[in-house]
Amino acid sequence: MKEVDYIIVGIGIAGISFCEQLQANNKTFVVFDNASQQSSTVAGGLYNPVVLKRFTSVFKSKEQLETALLMYASLEKRLHLTLDYKIPVYRKFASLEEQNNWFAASDKPVLEEYLSTKIIKNNNQVIEAPFGFGEVLKTGRVDVKKMMDAYKTDLLNNRLLFETPFLYNELVSKKTTVNYNNKTIVAKNIVFAEGFGIKQNPFFKHLPLLPAKGELLIIHAPDLKIDFVLKASVFLIPLENDLYIVGATYEWKDLSNNTTPQAKTQLLKKLEKLITCSFKVVDQVAGIRPTVIDRRPLVGQHKTHKNMFVLNGLGTRGVMIGPYVAKALYNFIENGVLLDKDIDINRFD
């Protein structure tokens, strides 16, 4: 029998973020993950405090950024690798009206530290942007795949990761513990962070999680030469060796992890309106994002089983919001700090 403080189900961005809270507070844990959910692996990895479609502030943007940057810095130090790449985000302006809306937004107290008031002229001959760009400050990209691969390796080396499906029917909730697999593992608490897999979870499948399939392309474009993230009708995210991420799509019916020619065509049509240089598609990936109708995460405690918790619904901004909500859940469980009503699952009662 193995006794721990926590069982964690799922090791995407949400699971890693909660594990890091446990590491920081010297709590013991084990993790179950069978790699069936791929939303984190197709994440662009951007952290950006501004909703660029509407020029509004992200929910709790300052708190999110502070918590996230501290966690990624800690991870880099402990795992001896670089994860956080500081890179500006440029929003392409489609018109003079959008320029004016940008300046109006930059005057707002919640946005003034994030929106540059200088219009950047487009000097790149292969990008169609006659009205220039607006620069978002305090942005960057986390290499999510590198983080997940390194984190899983670290867990395996410490014998903390079970790469098997979690069997819900083998979980027994007691008053002060949860027992798994006939008491093979006994824990004080269990946190479910399995993304879209929550739909198979008998304890939390009632929550209004909306699965949204997303697909990305990786292109090779030697003549593009940008060192910033470009947001237009698609995102263009520079990697290394003239590679770029192009994304992303949203699909609500096909909920497989299979890539589709329709998504590829959709992204290519938008990309060809944005850049004029030649490029080659070298990869295409797909995954199911766990989204919520009110665009807020699903965080909280089971009504009956008081030692069961959920951390889910991070949507498209998991890199930034994941560490923040993981910290909130930890403080709720261990220190009795009430959850913000905007993220608490009780808001759907």
Image: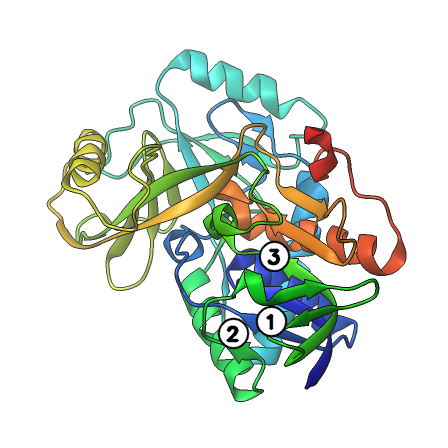
The disc at residue 192 is 3
Crowdedness near tag 1: few (<14), some (14–19) or many (≥20) residues, C-alpha within 10 Å:
some
x 82%, y 52%: residue = 332
Q: Which residue is labeled 2 in the image?
A: 151
The amino acid pointed to by label 2 is: Tyr
Residue at screen point 70% across, 42% down: 62
| C-alpha separation, residue under disc 1 versus residue under disc 2 | 9 Å
Q: Nearer the viewer, residue 217 or 340?
A: 340
- Indicate the amino acid at tag 1: Leu
Q: Residue at position x 10%, y 45% from top?
A: 278
Residue 177 location in percent, x, y? 78, 68
Looking at the rendered image, the quarter that the N terminus falls into is bottom right
Sequence-earlier tag: 2 or 3: 2
Residue at the (56%, 34%) spot, across then down: 208
Of badges 1 and 2, the one in the foreground is: 2
Disc 1 + disc 2, Cβ < 8 Å: yes
